[in-house]
Amino acid sequence: MTNYRYVICLILSTIAGCGAVAEESPPGFVSELIDKSSAAPVTNPPTSIWQYRFRDQLVFYVPPSCCDEPSALYDQDGRVICSPDGGLTGKGDGRCPDFFDERTEEKLLWRDKRGSRGNVMPAPAESKETPMKRITGIGGIFFKAKDASALRAWYREHLGIDVKDWGGAVFEWTDSAGRPANGMTTWTISSADSDYYAPSKSPFMINYRVADLHALVATLKSEGCQVLEKIEESEFGKFAWVIDPEGNKIELWEPPSH
C-alpha cells in the first residue's frame, strides 16, 4: 500500500502536488532589517515590512518611517531596487513609479510592536491592510503676529529670511548635493486678526503635503477626526483642513501633478 501511494503521488505531483507544501520563509536579510528596526528608537508610524510580487519577482517594501525619509523596495537578495515613495517630493526616487499600481500578492511580514522584538512570522494568505501614504512633507508654516510688519523685518534682518511683500518667503527644496528638487515650503507671517486659521484659536497653522487628499480625508473621517467639510481645488493643488485634539487647524495640501 505504501508503494502504491508513492506511485500515485508521483503521478499527480505535476498536477496538484502530494501533501502540504511548506510556505517559503522570507530571505535572511528581512530578519536583519527587523533586528535593526527593533534596536532603533520607535518610529511614528511604526516600521513595517511588506512582501509583494512586482515585475515578476518577490519584493520587500519598507514604507517611510517619518517626514521626508524615503521608502525602500528590496529584491530577494536584499538589494534596493528603488524608493517608491517618501523623500523630499513624497514620490520617492522615480525609479519605480508603477509600483503601487502593479504590485500584487500583498503580505504583511512584520510590524514594530513599539519596542518589542519580533520574529518573522508566516504572513496571512491575503492581508486586507494596505499601507497608506499620509503626510509626505511640510508644505508651509503660517503664524500670526501682533505687529506683522515689524516681525517680518526682524526675521529679514536677523535671520536672513527673504521676506517678500506678500508677507512670507518660499524655501525651494534641494537634494543632498544641493541640486533643485521638486518641492518647496512656504513660510508666512500674518496679522493677528487673520481669519485664515478659523475656527482654531491657535496663532499658527502648519500645511502638510499629502499624496492623495481625497483618500486621506475619507480615512480621517472614518477614524473620527474633526475634518472641515470644505475642500478647495485649483491650479495650485487640492486643499483640506482638519482640527487636531488640541484645537489646532491643520492644512492638508496635495500639490498639482505638473
Image (cartoon, grey):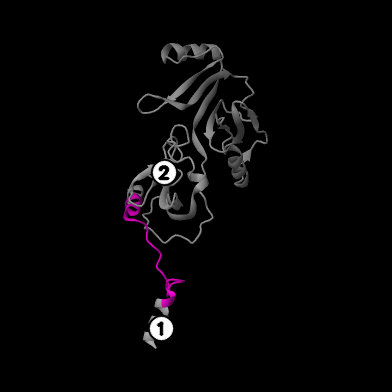
The one of 41 and 102 positioned closer to us in this rendering? 102
Drawn side of residue 204 relative to residue 36, left or right: right
Mark 1 is on which residue type?
Answer: Arg
Residue at screen point 49% across, 36% down:
136
Q: CA distance from mark 2 to mark 1?
A: 54 Å
Mark 2 is on which residue type?
Answer: Thr
- Dot 1 falls on a residue whose secondary structure is helix
Q: Residue furthest right?
A: 229
The one of 256 and 1 positioned closer to us in this rendering? 1
Of mark 2 and mark 1, the one earlier in the sequence is 1
Residue at screen point 39% across, 68% down:
22
According to the image, label 1 marks what residue?
A: 5
Q: Residue 143 appears at what percent x and percent y? A: 54, 23
Residue at screen point 59% across, 46% down:
223
Over which residues does the magenta segment extend?
11-34
Residue at screen point 44% across, 39% down:
66
Given contact means CB atoms under 8 Å apart, are the residues at marks 2 and 1 in contact?
Answer: no
Is residue 38 one of those drawn in magenta? no
Residue 148 visible from this viewpoint:
yes
Work out whether 164 lies above or below 174.
Answer: above
Drawn side of residue 176 relative to residue 94, left or right: left
- The chief SS type of the magenta part is loop
* Quadrant where the C terminus is found in the figure: top right
According to the image, label 2 marks what residue?
A: 43
Q: How many marks?
A: 2
Residue 147 visible from this viewpoint:
no
- Dot 2 falls on a residue whose secondary structure is loop
